[in-house]
Image: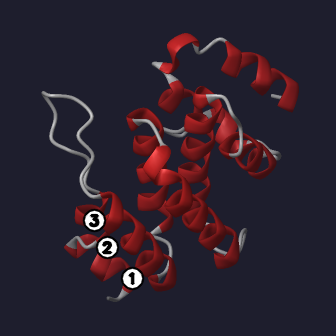
Amino acid sequence: MTMEQSERQVEELEGGYLAHVFSACGAPIAKTSFVVELTDRWTKSKDSIRIRCGYGLLYEISKSKKKNTLDEAYFLAHIATIDKQRKKASIPILMSMAGALMGMGMRTTKLNKAALKVASSIGPIIHNETCDPFDVVKHLTSPHTKKKLGL
């Protein structure tokens, strides 16, 4: 897959209903050599589908077992951006941002603290009437996370 193919394919996500499948859930695009560049480009985009996919890719990057691939500063910068952008984000974008916060907050204690602060400011996200709200704080303070990070 090339950068150009990724740009063409994201255009085909009419309505964005499959944005999370395209960019997260172990998606092939998240395994490309240009995933970081694409993440940075799409999270800064004006196009809502690209923004959502960008944060989906950020979630995938944050789950990488290669802890030394990107440093904390990279993720802290994205956490700060989410904090600045969250108030004007639509619910679908906020859900993608929250997913990225969850992933980043499970990497290290420092990232957990930063992501938890922003997630607390966001609060549980009500995205539809039939599902429970998406509560990132709950995930970042779970017994599993505490054990994993030694909190």
Q: Is residue 7 visible?
A: yes
Q: Which of pointers 2 and 3 lies earlier in the amino acid sequence?
A: 3
* Circle 1 residue: 149
| Distance between the alpha carbons at the discs numbered 2 and 3 | 11 Å
Asked if residue 125 lies left or right of residue 104, the reply is left
Q: Position of residue 64 (x, y in %)?
A: 59, 60
- Residue where numbered disc 2 is placed: 145
- The scheme the figure's colours follow is secondary structure
Residue bearing the label numbered 3: 137
* Point 82% across, 47% down: residue: 33
Seen as rendered, the residue at the extreme bottom is: 150
The kind of residue on which mark 3 rests is Val
In what element is the residue under mark 1?
Answer: helix
Q: Quadrant of residue 94?
A: top left
Which of the marked residues, 3 or 1, is nearer the chain's N terminus?
A: 3
Q: Secondary structure at mark 2?
A: helix
Residue 108 rendering spot, x and y as whole percentages: 49, 79
| Figure quadrant of residue 17 | top left
Estimate how packed mark 1 is, as few (under 14), some (14 to 19) or many (20 or more) residues with alpha carbons within 10 Å. Answer: some
Residue placed at 13% from the left, 28% from the top?
Answer: 130
